Amino acid sequence: MRKISILFTLLLSFGISAQEVFVLQPVNIDPSDTQKFEMIEKTYATPMAQEAKEKGLIKDWYLMKKSWGGRATEKALYIWVHVYESIDQMSNAGNWWETKDKFGVAAAEIYDGVTRYPVGNFMYKTEKSYETDRAGKFVIFNWAAPSDMGKMISLADKISSSFKGNMKKSGMTSWGMATRVYPQGEEFDPLFFWDGYETRAQALAHLMNQGVLDVVKPEMFAELFKLIPNGFSNRVIMEAVTGTY
C-alpha cells in the first residue's frame, strides 16, 4: 500500500522545472474491455515504465481513468500521462513500452481483444506547481482558452498563491499549471490546469468553488471570468489507476 500512496502523491504533483514537459495521451475503451485493459496496463506496461524510469528514459508514467459523470452511451475514457525532465529526454526515450524483449510477446498480441479508440497526443510544458507530502487519488483536469494568455497566467499565479495555505485543510494534494506545446491551433486550448485531491468529494467541492477556493477573493473570480467568460472549456475528474513510483 505504501507504494500506491507514493504513486498517487507523485502522480498528483508532477513537480516543476523550467524544462519539464508531459504528454497526455487519451484513449477510449469499450466498457466491456476495461477490466482486461487495466490488467494489461498493471501487468505489462507498469513494470516496463518503472524500468524506463530507472534507466533515465522517462521521469514518470501514469494511467488515469475518468472517475465519474458523463453520458451512459460514452466509452470509458483513459489518459496515459508521460512525464519527461526535458524535450531531449522525451526525444531519446524510444519505444520503451514494447513488450517483446521483456515478456516474449509483442504489444500488439497483448492488447488483442481490447478495442481501443486513440484520441491523440498532446504535449504541455509545466509552468508552475505546488506539491505536498500527502497522498491523493483524484485529479481535476481543466482546459481553458483565455482572451489574454499573459493576464490569465499572472492571475492564476495570484489565485494559487492565495489558496496555497488552505490546501491541507481542504484535502488538496497538488495544483499545477501548464501551457500547450503541441499541437497548437484555434481548436486546441492553450492552457491546462490540474487540481489533485484525496477524495472525489473534495474534487467535486472544488468544482463548486468551495474547499480550497473559499479563501480566494471575489474580485479574483470576477477577473477570472472576464478572461474566460464561458468558463473552462472542459473539466474532468480523473482517477489514478497505476503508474511509476
Image: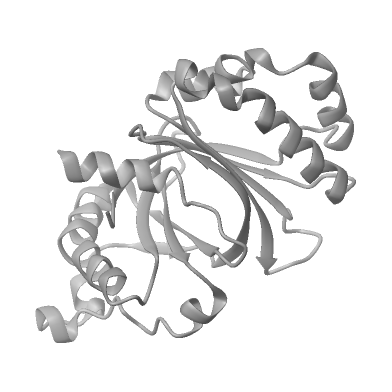
| Residue 119 visible (yes or no) | no
Q: Tell me where residue 107 sits by quadrant.
A: bottom left
Residue at 26% x, 71% y is 54
In which image quadrant can residue 120 be found?
Answer: bottom right
Left or right for 218, reference 244: right
Using the rendered image of the protein, determine whether residue 123 is visible from the camera's viewpoint. Answer: yes
Residue 87 placement: quadrant: bottom right
Q: Nearer the viewer, residue 174 or 22?
A: 174
Report the front residue among 242 and 133.
133
Residue at x-position 54% and y-position 67% = 121
Q: How many marks?
A: 0
Give the x, y percent position of residue 76: 39, 46
Q: Residue at x 27, y 54 (%)?
A: 245
| 212 w.r.t. 57: above or below | above
Q: Position of residue 159 (x, y in %)?
A: 72, 29
* Residue 61 point in image, percent of width and height: 36, 61
Quick check: 182 above or below 199? below
Name the colouring of the figure.
one colour
Against 20, is 105 above or below? below
Q: Please indicate whether residue 153 sits to the left or right of residue 213 in the image.
A: right
- For the point 89% across and 45% down, the residue is 147
Query: Viewed as shown, does residue 12 lie left or right of 37?
Result: right
| Residue projecting furthest to the left | 104
